[in-house]
Amino acid sequence: MANEWRGKSRGSVLGYKIFVFCIKNFGVRSAYFLLYFVALYFCFFSGKNTRAIFYYLHKRRHYSWFKSVINVYKSYYVFGQTIIDKVAIPSGLRNKFNYQFDGIEQIEAALQQKKGGILISAHVGNFEIAEFFLNEVDEKAGISLLTTDEEHREIKEYLERFTKKTNTRFIIIKNDLSHIFEINAALARNEIICITGDRYIKEAKHMTADLMGQEARFPAGPFLIGSRLQIPVLFVYVMKHSATKYNLYARTVVVKNRDAQDLLDKYVHSLEWILEKYPLQWFNYFDFWNDLKSHDKE
């Protein structure tokens, strides 16, 4: 298994169609019920992903073998819930969910500086619904999401039929680095740039840091940008607290000018903190630490 993420997440249009059908006809909880079987399927028929999440639970969180096996299933189940919520919330069911803010005033303070800001998150919880939280802060706040263009186009096009359009702009990461100009333009408009800092693509520039006792690779871009532009930087996580409740956590970061490694180290510390609170919401289902082969030989 390659240690780097390949730019695509697993999924099919058919799977989304089934969930959308359940949500539209029977409600969100019916889709949650279906997940009991879907999660079990992935435990047995998604070997590489299962091995990766088992490694995280057993070797990095130091759970027992039995507890790790049980929590592999729970992790798949919670991940499935977040996928369903990504469809349900923008489809007009936002009022079915409760939201709680922890540190929202720090985002408000960043916006008041009129410099824009960078929110760095991770593939934990459900960061893709962050815009629905941020609208609570300032409905006029522009949001730009930095992303790759490798995710399944068919899924995106299908979901657009059922979800409401938002003001979120997408900035596509490109090999020629032209996205840097789009970022600067967005910041000049006092917009918020949302980016994840925990996945790098093969051949892209990366940095290393110790995460949960083992060295791992991280994309250099978020930390180079955040340390050089002299704008507010916050770590933000949107975590699923219960079936119908999400918690948003926002923490302002003291950034040393042009010290990307320092920003990465603070990010890793923040990531460990949120995972201590929500250990099952680590959704990097690949060999994140590049350590599975070595353990296979033990």
Image: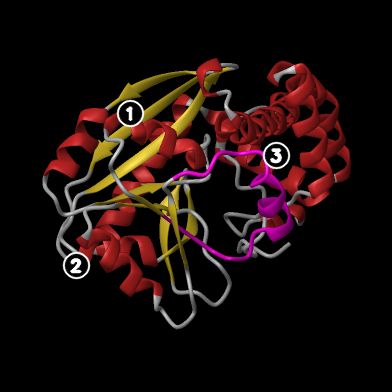
- Which amino acid is tagged 1? Glu
**Sequence-first disc among 2 and 1:** 1
What residue lies at 65% left-to-right and 65% top-to-bottom? Answer: 6
Residue 245 appears at what percent x and percent y?
A: 50, 18
Left or right of 144? Residue 22 is: right
- Check if mark 2's residue and mark 1's residue have beta carbons within 8 Å: no
The residue beneath circle 1 is 136
Q: Nearer the viewer, residue 266 or 241?
A: 241
Left or right of 103? Residue 35 is: right
Image quadrant assignment for residue 121: top left
Disc marking residue 54: 3
Measured along the vertical axis of the image, is residue 139 above or below residue 216? Answer: above
What residue lies at 80% left-to-right and 39% top-to-bottom? Answer: 17
Residue 283 appears at what percent x and percent y?
A: 60, 42
Q: For the residue labelled by badge 3, is the local secondary structure a helix, a strand or a loop?
A: helix
Quarter holding the N terminus is bottom right
- Which amino acid is tagged 3? Phe
Q: Is residue 260 in the magenta section?
A: no
Residue 150 appears at what percent x and percent y?
A: 63, 65
The stretch of residues the image draws in magenta is: 145-166
Q: Is residue 62 visible?
A: no
What residue lies at 50% left-to-right and 74% top-to-bottom? Answer: 204
Rounded to the nearest angstrom, the CA distance separating label 2 from label 3 is 37 Å
Q: For the residue labelled by badge 1, is the local secondary structure a helix, a strand or a loop?
A: helix
The residue beneath circle 2 is 258
Image quadrant assignment for residue 135: top left
- Check if mark 2's residue and mark 3's residue have beta carbons within 8 Å: no
- Check if mark 1's residue and mark 3's residue have beta carbons within 8 Å: no
- Which amino acid is tagged 2? Arg
Left or right of 142? Residue 294 is: right
